[in-house]
Image (cartoon, rainbow, N blue to C red):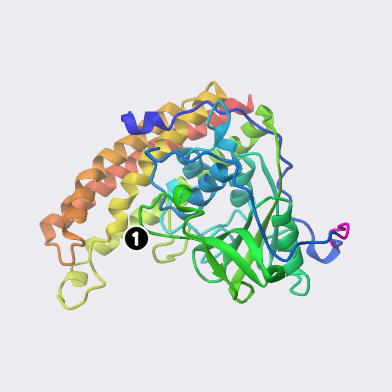
Amino acid sequence: MSETVRKTINNPESFSPKKPIILELASQAPHKRESVELPNEFSVTERGVRKVNNGDPHCMVFPSLTRALGTFLGTEARQLNDYNYALQMGISTEGFALYYDEHFNKNGANKWGERIIRNSLLIGGIQHRIAGINKAVVCDELINFETVNRSVCECLFNDYPVLIKQNGVDTYLFVTGYKNNGEILTAYKFFGGGNGNHALDLKAACEDYSDWKNEMEAIIYIEQISEPNEANRIEIIKETLQIVYEMLTDKQLPNTGNYDYGDQLYKLWISRLDNDSNYENEKDKTKYVYPEIADYHERRLYTAGFFEQCHNLLGRGTLIKSGEAFAEIHNNLKPLYELIKGKGEIKMPGRKARDKIITTLRECQKQDHIAAQHIKETLALLEN
């Protein structure tokens, strides 16, 4: 394994979260809160210590968000870092797909409901509740627009940030304060792309948002931070591994553009590259070798670290072999990444070049199958 992967390996402590439950919205009673006089404006206290050279990229939206949240709340100050980027690449499943950033059942990308987003927070001991704009968003409660200002202000006044998923885009607002009784929120925007270390930029790059209610899809209210409990953390790891196995072996997905994973993703890419008609018109700039193919190398690298952490936590199984398979994918794609990185994008590759890329992708697909088999073996072992 590479040194970069090894830097991400930790044997984290665990915690005791509540079980993920989809509440029946129609029968759910509103939360009862004592009337508290809130100040006109307030800013949440940052507990964590920022590390300038931690070696982790922070461009995948939800892993970046949860990593920054851990830094902000001080969970990374624990003796063993239980909130590192590689762990979140796995729990959020970002390491297993591309454009898989929608955690509220968008574009067919997340058929596992709220489990992924909940587990991403609970694995760090962060208790929370989710409010959505309608019943299409898997959540605990519906947003009441008459009282939402106060709900957000109360959470912030309790010294916890608020996370707002913006509607129709892969963007979150990391809210750290409010002004004018909540009409204006102070927040840092997380969005896809780039390599900025969001955990470091969080406070310095905050902006004021007065139109936040017009652009939101869901709100994540943080309620408390729990102490570790190994048994429940292991349950989250097991559930994640089951989801990951389903992703890596899923052959029945419809063609949803780039929102794919597993065999469907490879099928999509190879079919595009293998179709000569896609490369006959030099003016057609939409048919080229997508940089996302090479982007896989970074995702697989950090998810290899996730497998190693899971193996250390579980104490048995063959997830080390899954990590090795993903490291091999990283090694196979690295030359392609360097090629695309150097030229920006390859718009009209010749047949010989495309055949070489197809061969590489098929080898990567084989390694995915190897990783999946070791996940299956490990899950079976854990059931005995």
Asked if residue 202 shows in the view, the reply is yes
Could one spot residue 135 in this view of the protein? no
The answer to whether residue 31 is magenta is yes
User: Is residue 168 inside the magenta stretch?
Assistant: no
Q: Indicate the amino acid at tag 1.
A: Leu
Looking at the image, the residue that sits furthest to the top is 315
User: Where is residue 317 drawn, in percent x and y?
Assistant: 51, 24
Magenta stretch, main secondary structure, is loop
Say if 233 sits above or below 384 in the image: below
Give the class, few, some or many, for how many residues have Cα within 10 Å of label 1's Cα (few <14, many ≥20): some
Is 375 situated left or right of 284 in this image?
right
Going 50% across and 26% down the picture, which residue do you hit?
A: 311
Looking at the rendered image, the quarter that the C terminus falls into is top right
The quarter holding residue 220 reads: bottom right
> Where is residue 340 drawn, in percent x and y?
20, 55
Front position in the image: 205 or 142: 205
> Residue shown at 39%/30% (left/top)?
7
Side (left or right) of 361 relative to 209:
left
Q: Look at the image and tell me in which quarter the N terminus lies.
A: top left
Where is residue 260 drawn, in percent x and y?
43, 58
Magenta span of residues = 30-35
Relative to 199, residue 38 above or below: below
At horizontal 34% and vertical 53% (from top left) the residue drawn is 266
In x, y percent, where is residue 299?
Answer: 38, 46
Taking the spot 74% from the left edge, 50% from the top edge, the residue there is 21
Residue named by callout 1? 268
Q: Quick check: 110 left or right of 341? A: right
Q: Secondary structure at mark 1?
A: helix
Report the front residue among 355 and 48. 48
